[in-house]
Image (cartoon, rainbow, N blue to C red):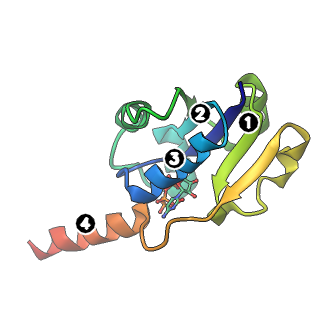
């Protein structure tokens, strides 16, 4: 078995999220996804996700290509999470290119091209501008 681990918020689940998880799943036999908690998001971005951790993790776990999800509570423990979950490879979208190279001492590190034209931040902007127009 080869275990792939990836991380993300996966708020307002969209096609870019699905595509990165599909490609990550193809790289191994077991896909584990660390999903950032609401508290981590607030600390990191200054606002809460639209969907709660409970909702985001249930959506990701229900995809049929994800074997396991866990809560990413702090950014500082990525290395520990990789070891705990027996990662053979860490897979991230190319927006993180180079930022996780330090973990090459633990496992392989793979960056996959982002799907163009979609992001949770863009969706948040579209939704809030639509609401303002009502
Ligand atoms: N991702 C992707 N293509 C996109 C958007 C995201 O491949 N268009 C990948 C990211 O690179 C990451 C994973 O999906 O590996 C989770 O990303 P996340 O930060 O939760 O989603 P974003 O849409 O990038 O959210 P934000 O706009 O808040 O940064």
Q: Is the residue indicated by label 1 positioned so its CB lies within 8 Å of ligand 1?
A: no
Between marks 1 and 3 in the image, the one whose residue lies nearer the viewer = 3
Q: Nearer the viewer, residue 80 or 74?
A: 80
The residue beneath circle 3 is 22
Q: Distance from label 2 to label 4 (Cα)?
A: 31 Å
Please state the horizontal and vertical placement of residue 122, each as a whole percent of the image: 39, 69
Please name the residue shown 42% across and 65% down the image. Answer: 121
Q: Distance from label 1 to label 2 (Cα)?
A: 19 Å
User: Pointer 1: residues within 10 angstroms few (<14), some, or many (20+)?
Assistant: few
Q: Distance from label 2 to label 3 (Cα)?
A: 10 Å
The residue beneath circle 2 is 31
User: Pointer 3: residues within 10 angstroms few (<14), some, or many (20+)?
Assistant: some
SS at badge 4: helix
SS at badge 3: helix
Tag of residue 16 = none
Mark 4 and mark 3 lie on one chain; the one further toward the N terminus is 3
Mark 1 and mark 2 lie on one chain; the one further toward the N terminus is 2
Please name the residue shown 50% across and 40% down the image. Answer: 39
SS at badge 1: helix
Mark 2 and mark 4 lie on one chain; the one further toward the N terminus is 2
The residue beneath circle 1 is 77
Between marks 4 and 3 in the image, the one whose residue lies nearer the viewer = 3
Quadrant the C terminus occupies: bottom left
The residue beneath circle 4 is 127
């Amino acid at each position: 078995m080869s275990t792939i681990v990836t991380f993300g918020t996966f708020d307002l689940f969209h096609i870019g999220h699905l595509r990165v998880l599909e490609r990550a799943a193809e790289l191994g036999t077991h896909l584990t996804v660390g999903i950032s908690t609401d508290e981590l998001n607030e600390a990191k971005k200054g606002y809460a996700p639209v969907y709660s951790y409970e909702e985001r993790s249930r959506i990701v776990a229900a995809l049929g290509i994800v074997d396991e999800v866990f809560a990413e509570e702090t950014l500082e423990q990525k290395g520990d999470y990789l070891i705990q979950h027996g990662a053979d490879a860490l897979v991230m979208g190319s927006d993180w290119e180079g930022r996780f190279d330090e973990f090459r001492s633990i496992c392989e590190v793979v960056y996959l091209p982002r799907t163009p034209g979609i992001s949770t931040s863009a969706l948040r902007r579209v939704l809030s501008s639509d609401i303002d127009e009502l």
